[in-house]
Amino acid sequence: MASKIIVDQLEKSGYTTLTLPSANATANQYIKNDGAGALSWATLPASGKILQVLEDNLNTTVSSTSTSYVASGLSIAITPASTGSKFLLTLSGGSWANSNDGIKAYVTFYVDGSEVGDAGPYEEKDENHNGNGFIGHSATCLHSPSTISAVTYTAYYKAEANTAYFNRTPARTVFTVMEVGA
C-alpha cells in the first residue's frame, strides 16, 4: 500500500518536521502533536459525560419536630465507575412547616453517615395561613467520593422550630444522583 501526503502552498519560512504515527488510528481517534513534531493517535477523554442516573422519590409525607437533621426517607446507593467520578445530587419538591413568624426548612445531603452539602434554608412567610405554609425547595450538591466502592447518598431535612413536614402535598419530592465522568 502506498502512502501519500499532498501539500499545496506551504507558506511558512523555514522547515518543520512532523513524524507521522506508524500505525492506523482506531475509530473516533484524532491526531495529536506533542509540540516537538511527533504525531500520535489519541482518544478524547470521557470527561463531563453523564455515566449513570438514579432517582428516588417519596410516596408519603414524613414529619419531625427535631431542630437537628433527620433522614427524609430518600436514599440512593451508587457505585462509581472510577475514582475520578463526581456525583451531582439534586433534590426538588416541597415541605410544610408550622411557624408563627415565617417558615424555615433546611435540606442537606449525607454520604455514608457524613454531611456532604448543606443546601441551606428555604424560607417563606405566608401571612394568609397564620405563618403556616408550603415551602418549595430545590437543592444541589457536587460530591467527589474518590472511590470505586458503592456509596449511599441520603437527603436530610429539619425545621427551625415546630413541626416540619417533608414531601407534603401538593409537591412530590424527587432525589436524583448523576455520575459525571472524570
Image (cartoon, rainbow, N blue to C red):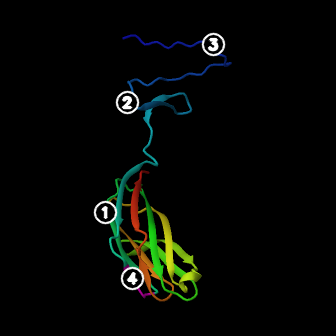
The label on residue 176 is none
Callout in the foreground (1, 4) = 4
Amino acid type at circle 4 is: Ser
Amino acid type at circle 2 is: Ala
Which residue lies under the disc numbered 1?
Answer: 150
Which residue lies under the disc numbered 3?
Answer: 9
The label on residue 63 is 4
Callout in the foreground (3, 2) = 2
Q: Position of residue 50 (x, y in %)?
A: 41, 50
Q: Residue at x 31, y 63 (%)?
A: 150
Amino acid type at circle 3 is: Gln
Q: Position of residue 84 (x, y in %)?
A: 42, 55
Q: State the separation of the CA atoms marked 2 and 4.
A: 55 Å
The residue closer to the viewer here, 174 or 156, is: 174
Q: Position of residue 171 (x, y in %)?
A: 43, 69
What span is in magenta?
Answer: 62-66
Whether residue 28 appears in magenta in the rendering, the answer is no
Q: State the separation of the CA atoms marked 3 and 4.
A: 76 Å
Mark 1: few/some/many CA within 10 Å (<14, 14-19, 20+): few
Amino acid type at circle 1 is: Ala
Which residue lies under the disc numbered 2?
Answer: 27
Label located before the other in sequence (1 or 4):
4
